[in-house]
Amino acid sequence: MACVALLSNPQSTGNRQTLPRVRTYCAANPDIFHYEVESVDQIGRALQTIARVNPAVIVINGGDGTVQAALTELYQGAHFNGKVPPIAVLPNGKTNLIALDLGIHGDPVKALERIVHIAKTGVTDHVVVRELIALSNGQAGSRPVLGMFLGGAGLADYILYCRNKIYPLGLPNSISHALTALAVVFSVLFGIKGKFMPPVSRPVSISLIRDGQLAGRFAVLIVTTLERLLLGARSANTPRGSMKLMAVDQNGPAVLRMLGAALLGRFGTRKMQGIHLEQGDTIRIEGDRSSVILDGEIFEANEGYPIVLRSTAPVPFLRLAA
């Protein structure tokens, strides 16, 4: 039995540089079963095969879309008869939020070495559980898409701005993200608009079932089941099954309060005007062509066609730091 099953997507941007080293490491290590897919459509078949190997850990090595498709298939595909092994995610995509939440960062091959060591010596002390976000149109019988981090309103627009306007410049990710952040700050704080500036967010309505409603234009909208929200904020005493929501009004003072609190390490410690921190097990997002991005994949809420988010039952993940 292989200790670790590695699912890789060679088409992801990060793998174009690191996959040859990963292949070399796997070829020399009989404890790893390595399965490569050419597209996310092949992930279901890949996991059927991986289930026969009965690994102690499943590792996902691909971009955001690969991770999302794998999580969806693992949770809904029933390949492991309800006993999914702990899941690890190698740092590969543009954001790596799930990998960072699990303490997995830096060189993917070194992270894989550490995962193999844990799988061989015992995973129990490294297993943590996370709920997933199930995104659907709310209709009975519709198959939801699963992920762990959703960005909406202005944040989704800024991500798309970075993806469509900044990434094509060919700059390193860190510089691309810094340029995007500067453009966002100037557009929100000083109202600077133009062809090459981020767009103004569309109005959106957010309903937390049983807990009220938020409506307006938001510079940032985040829903996540990750341990951390953003900017170091933690949501203390989160009930099991609850998603964490953060929304920041699209105006200069609210954004400045958010940035100031983050720099001082106080973000999320007290209530601030224009900054909303909520929790819920069902969240409904409505708007006119308002985009949301779940783990890198784009979805759109339209009038009469809302996006509905629900938290799932706990799923086991492997955290490198015990």
Image (spheres, rainbow, N blue to C red):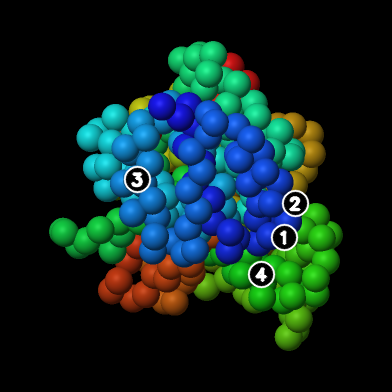
Question: Is residue 278 or residue 141 the one in the foreground?
Answer: 141
Residue 55, given in percent of the width and then of the height, sits at: 41, 30
Q: Amino acid under label 3?
A: Thr
Residue marked by disc 1: 252
Query: Which is more N-terminal, label 4 or label 3?
Result: 3
Q: Viewed as shown, does residue 287 lie left or right of 67?
A: left
Q: Kindly indicate whether the residue at mark 4 contacts the one at mark 3 (C-beta within 8 angstroms).
A: no
Q: How many marks?
A: 4
Tag in front: 3 or 2: 3
Q: Kindly indicate whether the residue at mark 2 contacts the one at mark 3 (C-beta within 8 angstroms).
A: no
Quadrant of the drawing holding the N terminus: top left
Residue marked by disc 4: 163
Badge 4 element: helix
Query: Considering only vertical position in the picture, is 269 above or below 173?
Result: above
Q: Amino acid under label 1?
A: Gly
Q: Amino acid under label 2?
A: Leu
Q: Amino acid under label 4?
A: Arg
Residue marked by disc 2: 256
Q: Kindly indicate whether the residue at mark 2 contacts the one at mark 1 (C-beta within 8 angstroms).
A: yes
Residue for point 32% across, 66% down: 306
